[in-house]
Image (cartoon, rainbow, N blue to C red):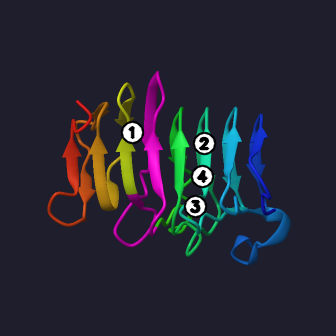
Amino acid sequence: VHADGPLTVDTLTITCPGDATGCTGSGDLAPAGNTVAVLGNLDVSGGTLTLTLASDAVDVDGDARFSDNDETGRLTKGAISVGGGFSLGCYNNTEFVATGTSLVMDGTGSQTLAMGCSSSSGNWLYALTVESGASVTTADDPLYIVSSLTVNGSLTVDAAGVVDVAGPAGSVVIGAGG
């Protein structure tokens, strides 16, 4: 599905029959330069989400979960904003392989970031922003971020947890928003 304009839905589940690596058409959602607003939860399970334009945006009021899918080469630009929790099913190493898509945690309540299968070889974030007023806790070890981490709200790392930011010098910014 390619959005021809802004799209608002209550809950969105993207699935694909059969092997997710060949998922196109009905099992793939591409905002095509638009914003997709999900008023509830986003579940990408077996299907795919494609963000390849800088203006591609997915705004999820609830939780976002990626499981049993292959996002390789599909998250190259744009942003996903999440008001609830963000998690991976950890069925494979390709459920969230962002090479340019940013994850923005912007909820007003407690949020959990659960990426227990995150590593430098797969299932990583490109850039993570914790907005002012957001309170995010990592639920797993490790959290691998390829480019940058910006914390303007609160980020709590589990006592045994690790956050690995592989970006260049200056790629970790704490409290830039005041």
**Secondary structure of the magenta portion, mostly?**
loop
Say which mark, if any, is on residue 57. 4
Q: Is residue 98 left or right of residue 127?
A: right
Q: Nearer the viewer, mark 2 or mark 3?
A: 2
Q: Which residue is mark 2?
A: 59
Q: Name the kind of residue labelled 1 in the image.
A: Ala
Q: Is residue 159 left or right of residue 12?
A: left
Residue stretch rendered in magenta on the structure: 99-126
- Residue 106 location (% of width, % of height): 46, 34
Among the two numbered marks 1 and 3 on one chain, the one whose residue lies closer to the N terminus: 3
Q: State the separation of the CA atoms marked 4 and 1.
A: 25 Å
Q: Is residue 134 above or below residue 114?
A: above
Residue at the extreme left of the image, as rendered? 169
Q: State the separation of the CA atoms marked 1 and 3.
A: 17 Å
Kind of element beneath mark 2: strand
Q: Name the kind of residue labelled 2 in the image.
A: Asp
Q: State the separation of the CA atoms marked 1 and 2.
A: 22 Å
Q: State the separation of the CA atoms marked 4 and 2.
A: 6 Å
Q: Which residue is mark 3?
A: 91
Q: Which residue is mark 1?
A: 139
